[in-house]
Amino acid sequence: MGLSHTHKENKMSRSRTFSQGLSHGAEATVASTSETVIFSIATSVADAYELTVTAKDTVTNHVHVAKIIVAHTGSAAVATQYAGTLTDAALASYDVDIDSGNLRLKVTAVSANSTKYIVAASAT
């Protein structure tokens, strides 16, 4: 069976659908230390995801990459960051929740510097 591929791209998000799996992505730029949603997807899409989050502080050029596994029941979500690498100190912490039928990844930055986040999510 061949790999089927569809690709949709716009300025704010990227997504790909493959016959062997499901991937989604998002980009966001945040200049705040307040908790901010950087990725959201309907809970009906999948029960678990592996997320790769790349954060780049656009002022210092420091990079923070995190690998996060997320599972949910449709009404509650849990996450574990199991890997990461940094060019300096951690740029942010991450949390997940369910809101209005959507699984959300939230970021709390340690600095108010403008930071670009790229989220790649693969259903597991």
Image (cartoon, rainbow, N blue to C red):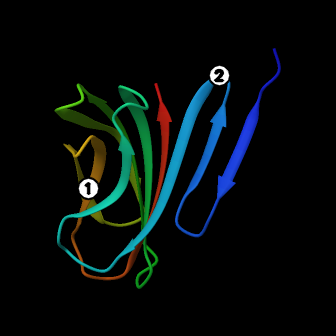
Point out residue 16 in the picture as x, y percentages from the top left corner: 64, 43
SS assignment at label 1:
strand
- Residue 84 position (above or below residue 9): above
**Residue at the (68%, 24%) spot, across then down:** 19
SS assignment at label 2:
loop
Q: Quadrant of residue 68?
A: top left
Task: Identify the mark at residue 74; answer none if there is no mark.
Answer: none
What residue is pinned by disc 2? 20
Which residue, as the protein is rendered here, is positioned at the far top?
1
Is 18 in front, or is 92? 18
**Residue at the (65%, 22%) spot, across then down:** 20
- Residue 105 position (above or below residue 72): below
Is 41 in front, or is 86? 41
**Mark 2 nearby-residue class (10 Å; few <14, some 14–19, many ≥20):** few
C-alpha gap between disc 2 and disc 1: 28 Å
Point out residue 26 in the picture as x, y percentages from the top left corner: 48, 57
Quarter of the figure that contains the N terminus: top right
Say whether residue 7 is left or right of residue 82.
right
Q: Quadrant of residue 59?
A: bottom left
Say whether residue 116 is left or right of residue 1.
left
Task: Identify the mark at residue 106; answer none if there is no mark.
Answer: 1
**Residue at the (66%, 53%) spot, across then down:** 8
The amino acid sitting under disc 2 is: Gln
Count of numbered labels shown in the rendering: 2
